[in-house]
Amino acid sequence: MSAPILEMRNIVKEFPGVRALSNVSFQVAEGEIHGLVGENGAGKSTLMKVLSGVYPDGTYSGEILFGGEVQHFHGIRDSEKVGIAIIYQELELIPELTVYENIFLGHEIRNGMVVDWNETIRRATEVLKKVKLSINPDTKIRDLGVGKQQLVEIAKALSRNVRLLILDEPTAALNEDDSKNLLNLLRDLRAHGVTCILISHKLREVIEIADTVTVLRDGQTICTLDAHKGEVSEPVLIKHMVGREITNIYPSRHSKPADEVVFEVRDWSAYAPRLGRTILQDINFHVKKGEIVGLAGLMGSGRTELALSLFGNPEGYRITGDIFIKGQRSFRHPQQAIAAGLAYVTEDRKGKGLILIQDVRQNLTLANLRTLAHRGVIDANAEIQVANEYRTSLNIKTPSIEQRVGNLSGGNQQKVCLGKWLFVKPDVLILDEPTRGIDVGAKYEIYTIMNQLVQQGMSIIMISSELPEILGMSDRIYVVSGGRIAGEMPAAEATQEKVMQLATNY
Amino acid sequence: MFFKDLQKVLKQNIREYGMYIALFAIMAIFTVTTKGIFISSRNISNLVNQTGYIAVLAVGMTLVIVIRHIDLSVGFLAGFLGAVAAIALAFWKWPVYVTIPFVLGLGILAGLLTAFLVAQFNIPAFVASLAGWLIYRGALLLVTAATGTIIISDAAFNAIGNGYIPDLLAMDFLPKVHKLTLLLGLVAIVWFIFSQISSRRKKLAYNFEVLPTEIFILEIVFVSILIGLITWVLAGYNGLSWTLVIVLLVVGIYHFVTTQTVLGRHIYAVGGNPEAAELSGINVKKITYVVFGSMGMLSALSGILFASRLQSATTTAGTLFELDAIAAAYIGGVSAAGGVGKIMGSLIGALVYMSLTSGMNLMNVDIAYQYVVRGAVLVAAVVFDVATRSRGQ
């Protein structure tokens, strides 16, 4: 192994209330492809943000050595200067500009005061050749497919004499051909001496291409494995990724699901016109009365899109397939889905769940305000009563129901979200990442509430990236991967390894 | 103790009280600089009637801005519909009770058209209503092209902008004072006191935080004196004008809808977070139609008030109304980020704005300086608003 080009030593990064990285050390040798894997929330993205200067020097502790020298990055510009480039999952190209304008954006080639466009185009053509992309540099980015856009991003990095190229989930949005293409390009770049860090959920890709693989879990480096010594294999990686002890205790439940199927989805496919690709394909699943069904899968596997497409389709997907809830239905607006007895608690409580500038009372009653009104006029006393009932029953910690929701803690915000949908009194409750970003105590409370609800005969579909939670709470589990149902199993037969294998199997 | 409480209450509600204090300060300053002419019954009565057609626009605009849009077309829409009303009355000889509903209906249609572009095609409201601005301006010129100014001779219609409510039968006491206006003022004060006490009781029953008793009494006394003063001043001229009656009705209805009804809550929810509102089963498009439809109707009302006040339709009617209304709404504390803004605030905003005009006119301030001062007040109001809001968080 050659000398390390990058060394990160004892990196600790804390956010209010959370330790995202606790003592991560990480070494990348010059000229290798280094795989970085871990579950969602393991700390991969945070680590890369520390490295690139998004979190500036001083907001974390630890040392970064690049090219043998200690570095203090105060912003992305600093890390770019020494030759580090990150390509994010959400591409950062400007769709209305041409390929060559994008490649040299922020580093325009000047001739005195003005941009030298001829030289720009000449150099762009050169660098496009390096990434084996044969397109006219005059093409606008929006006219390119995602695969080609990805290559333009890499070309942009190469134009700046990059020494370390970091790719965050580069193939998540690509089809198979484009993915293969990209991996070949990475091999080619390696041959030309470019070092590369590849962050990916697709373990097969990592195994296929990486020289070394580092596994992160819960903000810590678990191990670094050398592929050339035969240390890297799928079972080994999965074992290290999920190897966490199940420390959360799940409250026990004393009810069994009934045999009656209350919700069923058949041959459900969806095409997203905005993304220009099919996001869900031939999904079939059902939920019984009083059952908790877990939808496991990694971020970007299509779980949230599935939930939204079922819940009145606010994103405007083109959908085929059938929903059965109290007879056959199709919903053109969330309003109709709610009326049919479906409720959806979003994963993005601040962005899509709550109205942060309004108070607890207004948020709690919003989805079912009409039942509190006579001829359109809200019965203020009844509303206060309802709000206080949910505040008590869900144990929402707030000075008063007149408190702005934006001022509450994450756990209490989540309870307000939950309360809002319980007030709708649904038959089927979809919970999307119900415990993301909330503390252990609040988690336990939410699990307890879920158990009470199914005991009362409600059915719950729980979407979660946290495997222990899926295993601990569900009666039955579906694994979603690449917009399809990759497998189904009773919770009793499921293990973290089994689920992870299906989830990473594209 | 009392002063500590007072200080605390003022500090906590500085944002809300700020506008009232500003209005009070502006009026006080003009009263001094005009040697009392500003506060004279006659001038205040005029000021109120002038504020009318901007105030109704500001009320509608508040809701438009609350749902994160804007409507630039309202000024010339008001001008155009005022001209339509004039034509209906003067040329088609329609009676007033047909003309007014007809014009209000046209206003709603115009608003729905803007909403259609915004909701169905996702055209930015700025652009959609700018197109409206141009089109209605053209339409106004078109309908007034043949005749120029259209004179309205219908007495009932003209009373809307110039008339006053009739007085009780002549009585001997207090000559030259409008007795019915005084009586209504008295009723308003009694109603205010009773509603405040009953709402305080309810809050206490729920163990909610209420103002300390002394402050509560102070507030009641203060507002009662204020209502009393205003009615006294108005009663000293011709009493309550029909314009003021209409404005109070509009403000009352919109205040009620925004604070007490499902529709109002849905409007503020859409403004606060459209995505969350949509996922909560609120039809965001429908709300967009309702809000722009109401804006159109209020534009028509504004046009009627203005045409009635001038007793004619002119080729320039409605010029810059939209910007005055937007300025009034912002002075009144509406937020461009959406979801924030009160109807009462916009009414006060409109009063502040028109007081500046009236006061500076009385002082014979050059129109050039007037614009500068109005701009400065707008900036000051919004800076104050933003500063106090960020502190509240």
Image (cartoon, rainbow, N blue to C red):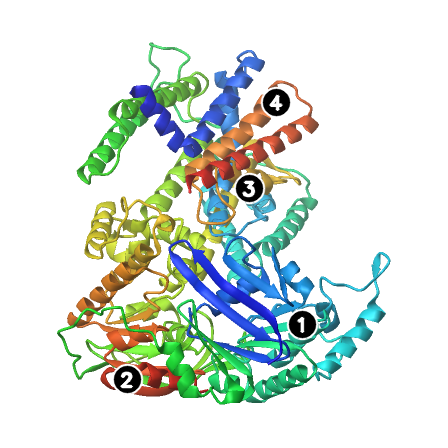
Give me the chain letter of mark 1: A
Label 3 neighbourhood size at 10 Å, few (<14), some (14-19), many (20+)?
many
Whether residue A269 is visible: no
Label 3 sits on a secondary structure element that is: helix
- The dot on residue A494 is 2
Q: Disc 4 versus disc 1: distance between alpha carbons?
A: 68 Å
- Identity of the amino acid at label 1? Arg
- Identity of the amino acid at label 2? Ala
**Disc 3 marks which residue?**
B326
Figure check: A315 above or below B12: below
Which residue appears at 69% of the width and 24% of the height? Answer: B366
Q: Disc 2 versus disc 1: distance between alpha carbons?
A: 43 Å
Label 2 neighbourhood size at 10 Å, few (<14), some (14-19), many (20+)?
some
Q: Is residue A255 left or right of residue A486?
A: left
- Identity of the amino acid at label 3? Ile
Label 2 sits on a secondary structure element that is: loop
